[in-house]
Amino acid sequence: MINLDEIRKHFRGRIKLGEPMSRYTSFRIGGPADYYLEPAGASDVAVIVPLLRKENIPFIIIGKGSNMLVSDKGIRGAVLNFEHGL
């Protein structure tokens, strides 16, 4: 389990738990992601990716969510949304 308080000390972007992926897909479907992260810059990515790997938490990277299908069961692991760029 990730220590969110520790991450927030070094991560400037948004962090949400159990965030519905339906908010981020063009088809407006999809259950919750365990962790939803919007990095504010490259330094956020440099902090979070090694941590996810260390904790063996699977992650995916998305952009605008177009043509992406997410199960109603959601995504186990983390979603890094680069829609707004780095």
Image: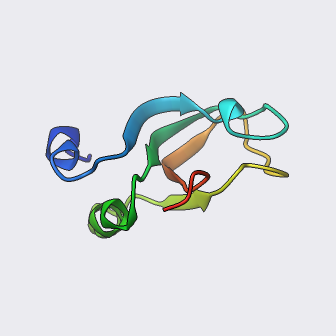
Rendered residue at 48%/62% (across/down): 86
The colour scheme used to paint the residues is rainbow
**Which one is in front, 85 or 76?**
85
* Left or right placement of residue 16 versus residue 69 in this view: left
**Which one is in front, 28 or 31?**
28
Up-down: is 50 above or below 60? below
* Left or right placement of residue 78 versus residue 60 in this view: left
Q: Position of residue 51 (x, y in %)?
A: 27, 63
* Left or right placement of residue 85 versus residue 43 in this view: right
Rendered residue at 26%/46% (across/down): 1
Rendered residue at 46%/47% (across/down): 38
Q: How many marks?
A: 0
Q: Position of residue 63 (x, y in %)?
A: 66, 56
Up-down: is 3 above or below 30? below
Up-down: is 61 above or below 66? below
Q: Position of residue 3 (x, y in %)?
A: 19, 44
* Left or right placement of residue 32 versus residue 27 in this view: left
Rendered residue at 27%/50% (across/down): 11
Q: Position of residue 40 (x, y in %)?
A: 40, 52
**Which one is in front, 46 or 52?**
46
